Image: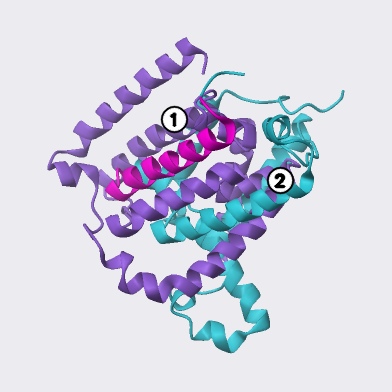
Chain colours: A cyan, B purple
Amino acid sequence: MKPTEDRGGWSPYLAGGLTGVVAVLSVWIAGKYFGASTTFVRSTGMLEELVAPDRVVGMDYFVKEVPMIDWQWMFVLGIFFGSLIASTTSGSFLWKALPDMWEERFGPSRVKRGVVAFLGGTVAMFGARLADGCPSGHGLSGLMQLAVSGFIALACFFLGGLLIARILYGGGERP
Amino acid sequence: MKMLAYGFITGILFGFLLQKGRVLRYDKQLGALRLIDMTIVKFMLTSIMVGMVGIYLLKDLGIIELSVKAAILGAVIPGGLIFGIGWGFLGYCPGTSVGALGEGRWDALWGVFGMLAGAGLYAEAYPFMKSTLLTVGNYGKITLPQALGVSHWIVIPLFVVVCLALFRWFEKKGL
């Protein structure tokens, strides 16, 4: 059968509930809460070490977040393989250069999408590091612990995102 | 070494469930930000509810410890808003960008490169942030029950009730 992106999907409530169980087991067994954005800092640090090792050693942020492969780095790598396994075994793996919603609104240019995705990623990660977390660390792990920082961060993530979605796509009318 | 293996296995499980829940998609993430498809919100809130109950049970039994991020308002609020703006353009967050790649959505790759660049930019800006924004409005590693001065077993059921009411509303509206 031809692969389609919806094959083998589960209810988001079921997949989310099981994710909650996995998150609790992770804290119980390994003492580790979910998070993803620090891994990007460590990876950039490792890349910069290839070019200018002496400079990296002297930078405060790379002293705080040492460029190395740790639990979270492997966790983020695992997300890639988990998604690969789930999609290939269910026939929902699809090579896709452009999201449908994007293409409908902004056309078939891959360069346009690439530039916006790159700049969006740059801005997003700068913000995540200033906030000290992303939707995994602040959103999931923070709210699970009822952290005040998590509630504030998640609200701000959505506020910023709602604003941009409105600018890019106009009002909230349904397609 | 054992920690690295734990990280990898946990990541695979998380990535598998993210893919099954169909949240690794630009269309779903922008769908939530345009208030037309609440799949990612259902996934997040269900995992948070389950995780919250599990984590506070294990904490009360003295088995695990919390790891709460500091509520530094001067950093979390602007950082969260900046993240949200970038997220609105990219349509993936740090964890889901890697997962989206795993199911063949390779526009996420430009986002990953952008996020590596963003992490590098923040590392450059960190000494400045440390003496400015990161010193503003620091309320410490505080949880919502601590801030309100009530038991977490009062806050958790309230959180669950609000989520369930929200889910009922989403389903009624077909979101």
Q: Is residue B107 above or below residue B160?
A: below
- Residue A54 occupies which quadrant of the picture? bottom right
Q: Which residues are magenta?
A: A145-171
- In front: label 1 or label 2: 2
At 40% from the left edge and 49% from the top edge, which residue is drawn? A138
- The residue located at (72%, 31%) in the rendering is A100
User: Where is B97 relative to A127, above or below?
Assistant: above
On the image, the x and y values in percent for residue B41 come to 47, 31
Q: Report the residue marked by disc 2.
A: A113
Amino acid carrying mark 2 in the image: Arg
Residue B46: mark in rendering = 1
Q: Position of residue B84 (x, y in %)?
A: 47, 46
Q: Is residue B111 left or right of residue A29?
A: right
Gap in angstroms between the C-alphas marked 1 and 2? 32 Å
Dot 2: chain letter: A
Q: Is residue B77 left or right of residue B148?
A: right
Does residue A16 lie above or below B120 as drawn? above
- Which quarter of the figure is the N terminus of chain B placed in? bottom right
**Tag 1: residue type?**
Thr
| Of the pair A140 and B92, the residue shown nearer to us | B92
Output the chain of dot 1. B
